[in-house]
Amino acid sequence: MANYAQVFLGTAFTSKSFSEVTILKDFLYCISGDGIIEQLFSPLDEQYEAILKEYEGKGNFRRLSNDEYILPGFIDLHVHAPQWAQAGTALDLPLEDWLNAYTFPVEAKFSDIDFAQAVYEDLVKTLLANGTTTVLYFATVHKQASLLLAKICSLLGQRGLVGKVVMDNDDQCPDYYRDADTATALKETEEFIIEVQQLNEQTKQGVYPVVTPRFIPSCTDEALQGLGELAAKYNTHIQSHCSESDWQHGYVKDRYDKNDAFALNDFGLLQEKSVMAHCNFIADEDAKLFAETGTAAAHCPVSNVFFSNGVFPAKHIHELGVDIGLGTDVSGGFSPSLYDNIRQAVIASRMLEEGVDTTISADKRGVDSSRLTTNEAFYLATAGGGESLSLPIGKIEENYAWDVQIINTNLQNGKLPIFNDPLEDIFQKILYLARPENIREVWVQGEKVHQR
Amino acid sequence: MANYAQVFLGTAFTSKSFSEVTILKDFLYCISGDGIIEQLFSPLDEQYEAILKEYEGKGNFRRLSNDEYILPGFIDLHVHAPQWAQAGTALDLPLEDWLNAYTFPVEAKFSDIDFAQAVYEDLVKTLLANGTTTVLYFATVHKQASLLLAKICSLLGQRGLVGKVVMDNDDQCPDYYRDADTATALKETEEFIIEVQQLNEQTKQGVYPVVTPRFIPSCTDEALQGLGELAAKYNTHIQSHCSESDWQHGYVKDRYDKNDAFALNDFGLLQEKSVMAHCNFIADEDAKLFAETGTAAAHCPVSNVFFSNGVFPAKHIHELGVDIGLGTDVSGGFSPSLYDNIRQAVIASRMLEEGVDTTISADKRGVDSSRLTTNEAFYLATAGGGESLSLPIGKIEENYAWDVQIINTNLQNGKLPIFNDPLEDIFQKILYLARPENIREVWVQGEKVHQR
């Protein structure tokens, strides 16, 4: 019999396909020393009883209670880490005022490493407490503070993918908050990549550097070109924003006479490990380019309401073969929770399908076949995120990382309304009604990183 | 000096007008024995120090900590209490399947008084734990279970307005779940009104009977007429659904050749204490009839996404002079939280303003001037709810009931991202980021009804 580092017994929910969820009722989950799901056993499997007998009662065996369920840890594909300091504020402002009166001044404060420590540590702990086990972060232009964020992830056990942000276009960036010049931006990005790759060597769950041009408007052509080359040289992930809003989409079209996706591709920024945030205005040909290059879209349904002028047509873009995951987009999105974003992904898709303006007749109000089901939104937050990052995460399946959240549905002050429900309904109640306090434990790569 | 039953010291947020919020920094709140805010004192008031000196240290004095803030208790204008048993499920189904496969069978189970006890007690506790101090409830057709809901509210300290639902139209209601006949429906409604009015005599915070035709499709003309007369005879509140969806709006037009609002008015169902749920499809003339009769609209922004085919144009209807409050509409709306509905009221209004379909040009995509600000959505959940019910609740002001929630922003597992913020920003962070665990105490009519 194999020698597992840990064995769990309980019921889990995980995606089988984009639209289907599998229920692993009373399965055994056998975890290796490096935090991988080595084997799964159903109660019908021949070895089930023998393994149970071998491990039950030992310190590395954990039997879930009747009110506990396992979900994959959530994967957040878009977080502006410094903006956590202002989450929930200024949402009534237009984008330009939001950026200039709030966001850029806040990000500029991350030259202060103590401030960075306070905000980043609080953010990483908060995301873990919300069941988020892997995060793709924008930090700020500051190399030291960006490195600090990677270190905090490493230390607190979260799988962090972190980018030092590049903003070197003095036309579009404020004097007090941008890279000193293009050469410095590229040099610091390269140093950052090397340091984070070294840090990764000592980090069980993985921390990764991400090449991060903020978006095309904030970067010079020279920077974009250099960043594409750095990503290729060091085989890193890449992130940016793509066709987020009317303004951004129009700006890129004016500058290059082509859509954002094709412009990014010209600089070598679309590839298998690229994730582009928002993408609300991408055309079908843009989506096909995403699919061909392996580029993923980070759907940010809460944030899109406030700053993006429309709904990302997730269902349609998925059908064109694009990998899609979810992003909170803290703090364009106020919520650090992917539960909230699963709910809003469903809501936004329904509003796209039904339309919004009741003075228009029903047949002309919305866009048919746009809705995402609950199962599909769950897929985006889990398996879709893993595919987007090209990492073996987001499913409870053999050879995937043991990144999970354990949910208790029956706490004194956090009881879900379960009255003899079938497991299918319990799953939906968890997705729609669970709060952070229902998330009792969070595990990343076989290590417990949060408990309450 | 007056003899107050209780005195609180702390900072509160309350609406000054539809768009403005007042911050009562370090005020004293002096509460009478019957649970009314008798006097408020600002630190600049002459008597402030004398009252502080008189009460500080006594058992009936409470000084909030630096991390605690007072908000008015929230007022939920639309809850289907029995549907709590299925909250969060079946949201992918079309309305007809949702009603026939889930909702009507669940409601029919409330002939079982033990089941009713379990669900209703859990719901009332959950709503209190979410900061909701007053609720306008639809129960079921069953008189005994409806009465039980009123008793549970009375006992647990919530201000409950409860309706025994009338559904007597056998064309539109299933055989297994409707009133026996029209005469029985009216007789049981009258008995219910009398019993709840008696219960109210023994209830400090108030419990009130509500005349409740489910909606026009489920009722005969005779029932609607009789219910209007009962409401007038006993001076009760009235609730129903109005122009919720394409289907409902069209059904009423077919039956009466007029809009829902005018049909309801013909039966005497629109008056000062009437609250109509949803109203997504009401025309301007319908809204003017609401304003003339004093009828309020219960805006249910989460539920509307799933079952209403469009966004309630809250800003526009408010400008026509209609009283508006918020409703969770459990379980068309999955969330029991008015925080979630405040957020969704803002979100829905932004999506109406911006539009949703990014293939349409920006100037034709949405409906200008539709957005609600955060302050306005807060107004709907508090002062707007009080106006809708014609009760002195929803504001922290002299002669209003002491119905409040005390929020702690700095818990070990529930810390809001506050880093030396001004009070204006703390208020917004509370509205967008607070979870039930941040709600440490809930008071109704001067009594503490929830604590954690």
Image (cartoon, coloured by chain):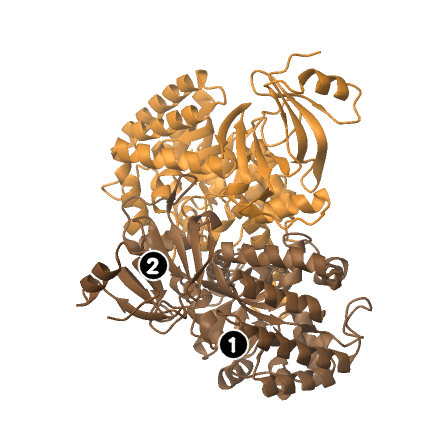
Chain colours: A orange, B brown
Mark 2: which amino acid? Answer: Asn
Counting from the top left corner in percent of width and height, residue A440 is at 54, 36
Depth check, front residue: B97 or A388: B97
Give the mark nearer the N terminus: 2 vs 1: 2
Say how many tags the image has. Answer: 2
- Circle 1 SS class: strand
Label 1 resides on the chain identified as B
Quadrant hosting residue B4:
bottom left
Counting from the top left corner in percent of width and height, residue B376 is at 41, 66
Query: Horizontally, is A145 left or right of A339 in the view?
Result: left
Depth check, front residue: A44 or B160: B160
Q: Are marks 2 and 1 on the same chain?
A: yes
Q: Residue at x 45, y 24 (%)?
A: A207
Q: What residue does disc 1 label? A: B296
Residue B279 shows in this picture: no
In space, the residues marked 2 and 1 are separated at their CA atoms by: 37 Å
Image disc number at residue B60: 2
- Circle 2 SS class: loop
Mark 1: which amino acid? Answer: Ala
Quadrant hosting residue B91:
bottom right
